[in-house]
Amino acid sequence: MKIVVVGGGVAGLVTALSLHAAGMTPVVHESARELQALGVGINLLPHAVRELAELGLGDALDGIGLPPERLVYCDRRGRRIWEEPLGLTAGYRWPQYSVHRGKLQMMLLDAVRTRIGPDAVRTGMAFERFEHQETGVAAHFVDRRTGEPVVVEADVLVGADGIDSRLRAQLHPGEGAPRGNGVHMWRGMSRYPHILGGRAIVVAGGRPGGKFVAYPVEDPAVDGGPALMNWVLEIRRPEPGEGPDRSHRPVPTDEALAEASGWNLPWIDLPELIRNSTGIYEYPMVDRDPLPRWSFGRVTLVGDAAHPMYPMGMNGGSQSIVDARVLAWALAQHDDPVRALEWYENLRREPLNQLVLANRELGPEKIIAMAEESGGPVPAEHATAVSQGYKQLAGCTTAVLNSRDSWSVSPVSP
Ligand SMILES: Cc1cc2nc3c(=O)[nH]c(=O)nc-3n(C[C@H](O)[C@H](O)[C@H](O)COP(=O)(O)OP(=O)(O)OC[C@H]3O[C@@H](n4cnc5c(N)ncnc54)[C@H](O)[C@@H]3O)c2cc1C
């Protein structure tokens, strides 16, 4: 079965690896002329790590990521509100990893080219539109090197083209731009000693637009220096249209220092963290409304194209990886790809839609808001209930993840 995947981000590359492992022939079409190691830190939760390990990428991931051991929530003054173990420390059979998104993408790209072939990712191919044919689908691209149109025929077309998905726009015309909440994230990477005992993901302040996050993505033991610390500082902007669009711009150090002056966290020297940063970039916090349908005949969506969500609870990239594996599994179970895509959607869409909505209500970070509202620590049973409830929604409690069947399949006949 020939499958065209649109987009060579994390979702698209893991989709290609999963389909190939199940005996199918995927080709990724990516609009960027060259895939580069872009982005800053991203977290892969144990449910995503399990999928990568079952694809044989466990050691490669261990070589580029750092397993955090604790999640620490603090109030705006840096006082601890809640702490819970992560990954192996929490009893999962798989670790969690904090990793540079670009390094993860390059690791996946390398695996795709090694396993599937050097031409398995075609860069510079910008998807335009598709049309269903009698027994397949025709995908229309523009070759950005020549400007020429290119038509590619396939048995199945998968949209992994991210939050601004062109494929999603064709399936759901009139949806419009992503939905912002007025919050922008300033993201940076900085050499900085471990904080709060090390191997911790720290979230302080909790409220959208008034939050600081930090976690290491590289261990000092690896290179002999301070940890490579990923950090995020949230700020509020006027609603889109009410001011200049500052999305994706580099943030000058002085501007970040001025914003950080409103914070006083006793366990980190924010000005030093900011001054040591290699670059600071502004990203809007955006998502999209849950969709009533992902699969249309031989066409479906995965990853951010299907369910972009606010970054609460560290699930965006992780759930994209699970999508890819479930899709390959469903296609391997059915001779009829149309039914397989329906099956995939039945397994994934509703829980993911709920997660998108839960993240609008702060996801597990609701614990910090609860502490703020009550003016003191949250009773442990209440915090546990929020944390566990969110994990249930995400399908990643220790009990579920450690015992559920694998999405691996024996390769299907070509
Ligand atoms: C440049 C970049 C940096 C990011 N940095 C971070 C980060 O630091 N931390 C974090 O948590 N998350 C980050 N993200 C988001 C994170 O990667 C995703 O939320 C998650 O991994 C799911 O990824 P995805 O593959 O569904 O979407 P994406 O990662 O957005 O990948 C989509 C891919 O599709 C390609 N594409 C888009 N339109 C077309 C088209 N018309 N034709 C062909 N290809 C197309 C894009 O170039 C991109 O490679 C970043 C995303 C991008 C694109």
Image: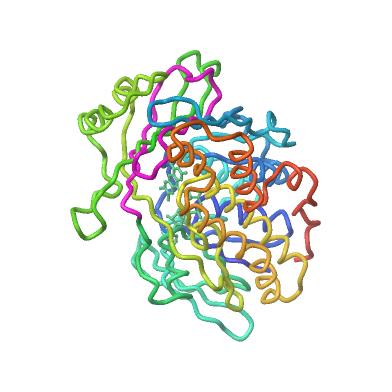
Query: Residue at horizontal 69%, vertical 60%?
Result: 328
When asked about the image quadrant of residue 301, the answer is bottom right
Above or below, comparing residue 159 to residue 15 in the picture: below
* Side (left or right) of 161 relative to 107: left
Q: For the magenta stretch, what is the residue range?
A: 181-210
Task: Name the image quarter holding the C terminus.
Answer: bottom right
When asked about the image quadrant of residue 157, the answer is bottom right
Total marks in image: 0
Q: Position of residue 122 (x, y in %)?
A: 49, 57
Q: Position of residue 179 (x, y in %)?
A: 37, 61
Q: How is the image coloured?
A: rainbow
Q: Nearer the viewer, residue 221 or 290?
A: 290
Above or below, comparing residue 61 to residue 390 in the picture: above
Q: Does residue 119 appear anywhere in the picture?
A: no
* Magenta stretch contains residue 69: no
Q: Position of residue 406 (x, y in %)?
A: 77, 51
Q: Nearer the viewer, residue 6 or 406?
A: 406
* Magenta stretch contains residue 207: yes
* Side (left or right) of 253 relative to 8: left
Query: Residue at horizontal 55%, vertical 15%?
Result: 221
Q: Nearer the viewer, residue 136 or 114?
A: 136
Q: Position of residue 315 (x, y in %)?
A: 55, 47
* Side (left or right) of 333 relative to 393: right
Above or below, comparing residue 315 to residue 170 in the picture: above
